[in-house]
Amino acid sequence: MKRRDFIKKAATVASVATATTVIGAPAIHAAPKYNWKMVTTWPPKFPVFQESAEMIAKSIKEMSDGRLNIHVYGGGELVPAFEAFNAVSAGTVEMGHGCPYYWAGKVPGAQLIAAVPFGMNSQQVNSWITSGNGLKLWEELYAPFNVVPFLVGECGMQMGGWFRKEIKSLNDIKGLKMRIPGLGGKVITKAGGTSVTVPASEVFTNLERGVIDATEWVGPYHDYILGLYKAAKFYYYPGWHEPGTVIEAFINKKAWETLPSDLKAIVKAACAQSNAWMVAEFDAKNNFYLEKLKKEHGVKVFKFPEDVMKEFSKLSIEVVEEIASKDPMSKKIWEDYKKFMINIRDLHKNSEFAYADFIF
């Protein structure tokens, strides 16, 4: 009996001690959660571009097990589309998604990151940014604005655009009013035309009514969706103005620095995933929709005359050199870009370009 009492008392003491240990133990802190806002320059549900933003947010949430949640807003839903960079720079929101040439008025060198007429294609510019000095220069360019850039895609070689009249010579460019942004627009102006900026919602109507004589958009996929084939019958190639347009995500520097290293790695991985997907998506969709335009709507594609292309090429160099001469950072980017472009083109002349002449 005494032994049973002793065992019973010992068990009680042990139970109390265990409970005390558990109750008195320091609480295990859960990993902090981050809730961010991402603003984009794209309309809600805009194919590929806005899809990329949504994909990045979803991937980050899944890979972080919900520790970093990003709410995505289309252009105009939280801030005006072209105010995205300013909102991220000021810290009003943590993240943005768009195209670097939209900030040309504030950051002149950004348009050299985005797309240089007759410059590098998507494969080449991806190499420059990822494995050359491109990303380092891009980060240096955005640093004064407290913004950190990330490559999230390229849209591939664009089409030359839709024209209401046939382009037979340089004379047909004079007086032409064309919706075309970025450096390409400056080239059209130098060639005697007029470049205008038209919101996506007004492009088709303005072209159909003759408010503008021509427009470039993106490529067969987006052109088909917008119905541009109904407003103009001359569809030109190649897209000399945007041979490999860069699409970016950008994060407020302070917000970026608050993230632990594992979440930073997850953000980088999600952006890299988007970059690989976007190039493939554009090639696949543009391939499919170019055939639809031809077979279902009888669209014929026209190649720009050689003299027009040569003049555009010459004027493109003048446009870029003028920008570089006025802004030290633009000059620094251009010199590195140009050197990389010349070298990689020498390589591709003996590989991709040479092969293209013999494919069946």
Image (spheres, grey):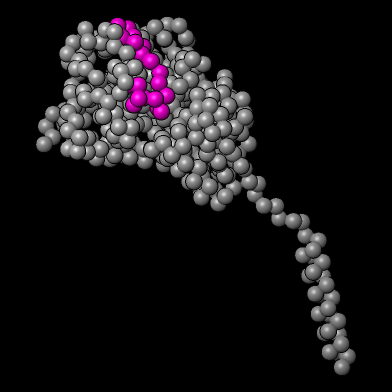
Please provide the residue range marked out in magenta. Answer: 182-207
Location of the N terminus by quadrant is: bottom right
Relative to residue 320, is residue 229 depicted above or below? Answer: below
> Which residue of the protein is positioned furthest toward the bottom in this rendering?
1
Closer to us: 243 or 350: 243
Picture quadrant of residue 147: top right
Vertical position of residue 36 compared to residue 324: above or below = below
In the image, residue 256 above or below residue 215:
below
Residue at the image position 45 percent from the left and 22 percent from the top = 102
- Foreground residue among 125 and 350: 125
Q: Is residue 10 left or right of residue 239?
A: right
Q: Main secondary structure of the magenta part?
A: helix
Residue 83 visible here: yes
As drawn, is 226 to the left or to the right of 271?
A: left
Residue occupying image coordinates x 55% and y 41%:
71
Residue at screen point 51% across, 45% down: 60
Total of numbered circles in the picture?
0
| Residue 187 image point, x, y percent | 32, 11
